Amino acid sequence: MRVYLASSFDMVPIVEIVADYLERQGHTITVKWWSKDGFDLRDKKADQTSDGFYKDPVCEMIFWRDYQGVTDSDAFVIVAGDIPKKFNGANIEYGIAVALKKPCFSIGCLENSAMYHPIKKCKTLSELSESLRYVQAER
């Protein structure tokens, strides 16, 4: 099953654990956005006074790379931590996945929001993998 993992950069250590586990279970991660691929704008995000961030061609490349990763996936997963938190880009990716009618899952603790209603919340990596296998078998 092709899976898109969404999260935030401060969650990368956990995202890597989830990705490794799912790959060992035979799943494929569509985009490893956290890897050092040269597409990193974190140092430019701090400047909120100009629109230079959005004019940077890397910004457009990141958008289309991640958009394609969501559209190419069979399932979407938000990787959260132990403490509920808000997500920015991951919520946009989640919206794309919902619009495309992708099965959506989470692992970790999402902040309460009615918009997360369609997500199947998984408590363990094995539960997540089993849920993905169930969706795969239905196809």
Image (cartoon, grey):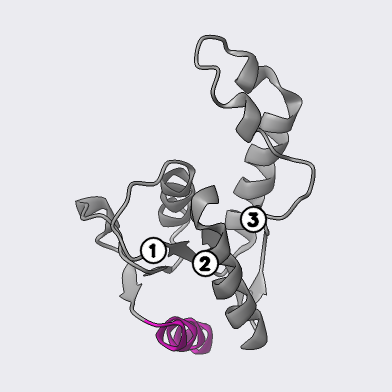
Q: Residue 75: give x, y in percent of width and height.
A: 51, 69
Q: Which residues are magenta?
A: 124-139
Q: Are marks 2 and 1 in contact (CB under 8 Å)?
A: yes
Label 3, residues with CA under 10 Å away: few <14, some 14-19, many ≥20? many
Neighbor class of circle 1 (other Cα within 10 Å; few <14, some 14-19, many 20+) is some
Q: CA distance from mark 3 to mark 1?
A: 22 Å
Q: Is residue 47 left or right of residue 99?
A: right
Quarter of the rendering occupied by the N terminus: bottom right
* Residue position marked by numbered label 1 in the rendering: 81
Q: Amino acid at mark 1?
A: Gly
Q: Which one is in front, 49 or 67?
A: 49
Q: Which residue is nearer to you in this view: 139 or 114? A: 114
Indicate which disc, 3 or 1, sits on the residue closer to the N terminus: 3
- Contact between labelled residues 1 and 3, with CB atoms less than 8 Å apart: no
- What residue did someone put label 3 on? 69
State whether residue 105 is above or below residue 35. below
